[in-house]
Image (cartoon, rainbow, N blue to C red):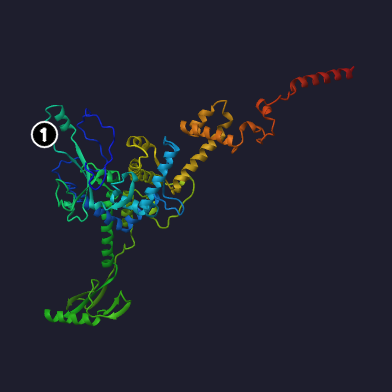
Amino acid sequence: MPKLFGFSISDKEKKSSSLLSPVPPSNEDGVDNYISSGFYGQYVDIEGVYKTEYDLMRRYREMAVHPEADAAIEDVVNEALVSDLYDSPIEIELSNVNASDKIKQKIREEFKGIKEMMDFDKKAHEVFRNWYVDGRLYYLKVIDVKKPEEGIKEIRYINPMKIKFVRKERKQKGNEMMGPQGPSDMKKAIYPEIDEYYVYTPKPNYPTTMFAAGGGRGNDKTSIRIAKDSITYVTSGLFDRNKGTCLSYLHKAIKALNQLRMIEDSLVIYRLSRAPERRIFYIDVGNLPKIKAEQYLKEVMSRYRNKLVYDASTGEVRDDRKFMSMLEDFWLPRREGGRGTEITTLPGGQNLGELADIEYFQKKLYRALGVPESRIANDGGFNLGRSSEILRDELKFAKFVGRLRKRFSNLFSNMLKTQLILKNVITPEDWEQLSDHIQYDYVYDNQFAELKESELLNERLGSLATIEPYIGKYYSQDWVRRKVLRQSDQEIEDMDKQIDKEIADGTIPDPSMIDPITGEPLAPGTEEDVMGMGELPVEPDLEKASAVTNAQLSKDTKAAEI
């Protein structure tokens, strides 16, 4: 791949040419392997939801403007990224990385530099919301081509509607329609070479023709190829397996939101048409001819009809004879022989206060977006009670937010990889080993999960207090730490090391210098007595003493009798 408008990072170790597979590598980017004559980003949807990714993202952004959907999205974003006044929303955690302190410090510095170039501490909410709504995120990593060792100089956001990731198979000359004839031909047929790049269109003329550049449709003059390693591409993790399209988490709520919109619009129309009462005027026209009867009816209407009109813009009530509304009364003629002139009233709608259908579709929308239904209620207070009072939906929501955080962290991993390799801090091979152990620590603000952990810890400590007298008699200390306290092997090892370190530093007292009876620290020089417990006092034999006393009393009694 040429370094046109970008750069490329390649491994020094080449893969063996004898590794053949008819199945291409699994890619989680929503891009399938296309041939050079195929279309990019075009699909046929019989349900009419979307035809291109362009239409899909437009629909997502329209959904995000709806008040109910916006409230649910804000709940997700606020839960995932906590904008604290003093702390950064995200920090890097390198405790599990097997590297020197110098390299760890360098990684922390580069991570801080990446956040400063993105201005992430200030724009964290906006960045995460754009990723959550669109379902994908693109950033251009700008470097100095003449000085690549200086690393990334600038990070720029790219509108997902203007860029597309393309994976295209290279055509093999003389082997387009032939099957495998030999080892070399077999390799070409089974495992073809694939070009991966991005196509950027600053001003797309039409959504279906924007992804062109090299064999596709559209105007090649407006499309620009960008090398793969120059772009940071993060997806939501949701894919339409039938069409190979990357989806947003809003996709599941498309139908629910449309239903909510229709039911709200129908409710407004029903309220306007059925809310007021209407009157029916039966006008006696006697034996007048049809034309005369109609004229007489119009005269009565103009004489008695209410001509006062309320102006909603100014709040004035004025006389407007030209005003015609859909809430007009009914005027009906009645011939001679009837009951004469009569006025009756049509009642308005009787079920105008029922909103059960609206509330149902609101809950359905929140369920589709993964947000607990309890957050819809405005009068619902925040409960800080026991874990038994915590809703299961809140725990599910906390796990959902955790999955979002892990997926979103790929944004920093990709940029950090590029920065460390360009600055020769590590090699691409080293990154493969370190990347699995690099973690990202988010500022946590879910009180429900904290209450759950606190309640579990209290229950374990209560069980420990109950079983402590039996340690060493029926249960071993190791069994108690594993089964009661639920400590893993790594936690036990780390705890023992930390306790020994704190004893050596004097942070906590040495258990051997504590009186086991009183729990008070012993005076210096009494350690040996504690270890050996000294000489135990000899308790008198009460039974033997009692027998001696009884014998003496019996002897004295006999002597007295004599």
Residue occupying image coordinates x 14% and y 44%: 38
Residue 439, by quadrant, is top left
Residue 229, by quadrant, is top left
Residue at the far right: name it.
562
Q: Is residue 350 above or below residue 222?
A: below
Image location of residue 370, percent across then percent down = 34, 48
Question: Horizontal placement of 3 versus 68: left or right?
Answer: left
Image location of residue 73, percent across then percent down = 34, 53
Which quadrant, please, contains the C terminus?
top right
Name the foreground residue: 276 vs 478: 478
Q: Is residue 202 above or below residue 416?
A: below
Mark 1 packing: few (<14 Cα in 10 Å), some, or many (20+)?
Answer: few
Q: Is residue 333 above or below residue 103?
A: below
Residue 261, by quadrant, is bottom left
Identify the element where label 1 is drawn: loop
Q: Which residue is mark 1?
A: 175
Name the foreground residue: 528 vs 299: 528
Residue 47 visible? The answer is yes
Residue occupying image coordinates x 26% and y 32%: 14
Image location of residue 214, percent across then percent down = 16, 46
Residue occupying image coordinates x 56% and y 35%: 465
Residue 94 visible? The answer is no
Image location of residue 105, percent across then percent down = 43, 42
Q: Is residue 554 above or below residue 478?
A: above
Q: How many marks?
A: 1
Question: Horizontal placement of 407 versus 466: left or right?
Answer: left
Which quadrant, please, contains the N terminus?
top left
What amino acid type is highlighted by mark number 1?
A: Asn
Question: Horizontal placement of 141 versus 539: left or right?
Answer: left
Name the foreground residue: 165 vs 366: 165
Question: Horizontal placement of 171 versus 163: left or right?
Answer: left
